[in-house]
Image (cartoon, rainbow, N blue to C red):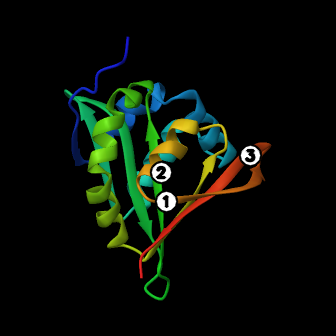
Amino acid sequence: MARRDTAIRLVPADAAHVIDLAPRLRPVDRIECAAMGHSAGQALRHGLLVSAQVWTALEGDRPTAMFGVVAGSAADSDAIPWFLGSDHVSRHARTLITQGPTIVAAMHRHGRRLCNFVSSENLQAIRLLEHWGFTVEQDHVEMRKVAFRRFIREIK
């Protein structure tokens, strides 16, 4: 039986979302965080603090994902998008795909080129990135024994 896409709403993220979401992150997201030198809670708190814009996807009143964009310097046209979610995020694939253009446009306000790394094992995230118009490179980069692939999206 196929999973139904249930309603989520995007709201500005806050510290309470970090506390609720951190212990429920998907295993693949926990692995990504650890490879970057952070626990789940540290990664979410860091993202909340340094990002120019951060959203939480709420299912009812419960965070199912947090994502944002870290702006580069004024001289730099790059920005770093990030996304961390619980296992429930897969319930909302259709909604995330359809809201993608709005989300990506908001991220591009902080940088002409959006670029980051995704675990090569994070197939759901790779599919979502491709739906959102990112190019996910085939080459792998290893960080703390975890293979990552660079993803990028650029506007003229």
In-front residue for pair 92/145:
92
Which of the 4 image quarters holds residue 104?
bottom left
Mark 2 vs mark 1, CA separation in Å: 5 Å
Q: Secondary structure at mark 3?
A: strand
Q: Please report contact status of discs 3 and 2: CB closer than 8 Å, yes or no.
A: no
In-front residue for pair 8/144:
8
Label 2 environment density (alpha carbons within 10 Å; few <14, some 14–19, many ≥20): some
Residue at x 51%, y 37% (from the top left corner) = 124
Amino acid at the residue labelled 1: Phe
Can residue 68 be seen by looking at this rendering? yes
Q: Please report contact status of discs 3 and 1: CB closer than 8 Å, yes or no.
A: no
Q: Nearer the viewer, mark 3 or mark 1?
A: 1
Q: Please report contact status of discs 2 and 1: CB closer than 8 Å, yes or no.
A: yes
Amino acid at the residue labelled 3: Ala
Q: Secondary structure at mark 1?
A: loop
Can residue 46 be seen by looking at this rendering? no
Instruction: Please give left or right for residue 134 compared with residue 13 in the image.
Output: right
Mark 3 vs mark 2, CA separation in Å: 17 Å
Residue 129, which numbered label? 2
Residue at x 60%, y 42% (from the top left corner) = 33
Nearest to N terminus: mark 2 or mark 1: 2
Q: Which residue is mark 1?
A: 134
Give coordinates of residue 66: x percent, y percent. Answer: 37, 43
Amino acid at the residue labelled 2: Leu
